[in-house]
Amino acid sequence: MRTRYRSPDSFRARVAAVQMEKQRPLWSVMIPSYNCAAYLPETLRSVLAQGLGPDEMQIEVVDDASSDDPERVVRDVGHGRIAFFKQVRNVGHIENFDTCLARATGHIVHLLHGDDLVKAGFYDRFGAAFASNPNIGAAFCRHDFIDESGRIVSTSELEQSEPGVLPDALERLAREQRITTPSIVVKRSVYERLGSFDRRLICSEDWEMWVRIAAHYPVWYEPRSLACYRMHLNSNTGRHIRTGEDMAYTRVAIEMFKSYLPPQIAEPITRTARRTYARSALSMAEQMLAKGDFRAFAVQVREAFRLSCGLDVCAKFAKIVIRHCLSVIGLRRRARRA
C-alpha cells in the first residue's frame, strides 16, 4: 500500500496574524513552564529587571498543567505585571510553544523557558539590532550554561567578535546547534510565514526551527553573553538523555533540514553534523557510565553509531571502553590492598 505524502507544513501549527485594535508592544516575552516553579522566580525577576513597561513588553507565563503552583509564583513576583495562562491538561512542550506563539501580541517574540534567565541589556541590544536592520528575521547572543544552583559551567563559543548579521548563518547553524532557546528572539511575522515548531520532533525541535529560519532570513549575532541556559536532568533535554531520544531526534532533525541547504553543500554539512553529535552522544555515554547508569550508557552508544560509524567515532568509543576497564581494574586492586 502506498504511503500518503504529508507536507511538512501539516506538522507545524499555523501562527495567525495578530488582530488588535490598540497599538501592539514591541516585545512578547512568552515563558513556557512545566514543573519548574523552583526556578521561575529568578526567571521572572530577570525579565522585570529590564524595566520595560506593558506598552513596550507583554510578559506571560504559559503553563503546561504543572503540579507545583506556578500561578502563585507569578502572582507573588509579578504583582499583576505578568499574565498567566494554564493549559487545561498537559499538552507537551511543542503544543505549549504553539500556545505561546498564538498568544504573543508583540512584534518580536522571546520564548524564555521557565528555568532560564536573561541578563541586563538583553532586550535593549536586540531592540536596537532589529531597528537598524529591518530585514533580519531573528537575532541571538552568546550565552552561559548554568547548573541547578545558577553557577556558570561554561559559555558558548564566540561566533564573531562584533555584533551584526552572521554571514554564513545557515551553514554554521546546520553543522551544529549553536543556539539555546533563551538566547534567541524572532520576529512574530517570521513564525507567521514559516509556522511553529515541528511536531515530529520532541527533541531538537528548536534546532530545526533555527535552521529553517536561517534558510529564509538573515540572522543577527550579539557577541555579549546576555542569556543563561540552565542544565539539569529534569529539563526537557535532560529527561530524554536517559532514553537516547535526545540523539535519536537529533538524527531526525538533521535529515529534515538537509533539504533547506543548497544541494552542493547539503551532504557534507549534514555528514559533519552527524559525526559531531555521534561524538557528543559518546561523551554523554561516558558520563552516564561514570554514574553507573548502564542503560543510559547503552542507548547513547547505540544512537552514536546510528549517527555515524566514522573512524573518529569508533576510536572515541574504544578509548571510553579502555578508560572504564582500567578504572575498574584500579578500583579492584585498591580494594584488595585495603
Image (tube, helix red, strand yellow):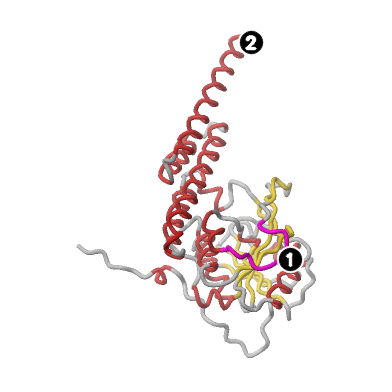
In this view, the residue in front, 142 or 132, is 132
Decide: few, some or many residues near mark 2? Use Cα within 10 Å; few <14, some 14-19, many ≥20.
Answer: few
- What kind of element bears circle 2? loop
Quarter where residue 210 is shown = bottom right
Does label 2 or label 1 sit earlier along the sequence? Answer: 1
Q: Which mark is residue 338?
A: 2
Instruction: State the image coordinates of residue 320 (x, y, percent, origin top left).
Output: 52, 31
Q: Is residue 41 visible?
A: no
- In the image, 71 versus 183, the foreground residue is 183
Percent across and percent down for residue 17 are 54, 82
Q: Amino acid at mark 2?
A: Ala
**Start-end of magenta stretch:** 159-169
Q: Residue at x 69, y 67 (%)?
A: 164
Q: For this view, does 224 lie left or right of residue 206?
A: right
| Res 184 quadrant in image | bottom right
Name the residue at the left extreme: 1
Tell me the CA gap for discs 2 and 1.
56 Å
Three-letter amino acid code at disc 1?
Phe
* Left or right side of 107 for 88: left
In the rendered image, is residue 152 in sight? Answer: yes
Residue 181 spot, x, y in % from top left? 61, 61
Residue under label 1, please give it.
122
Where is 21 relative to 183, above or below? below
Tell how many labels: 2
Residue lying at the far front in this picture: please name it.
264
Residue 18: x percent and y percent? 57, 83
Q: Secondary structure at mark 1?
A: helix
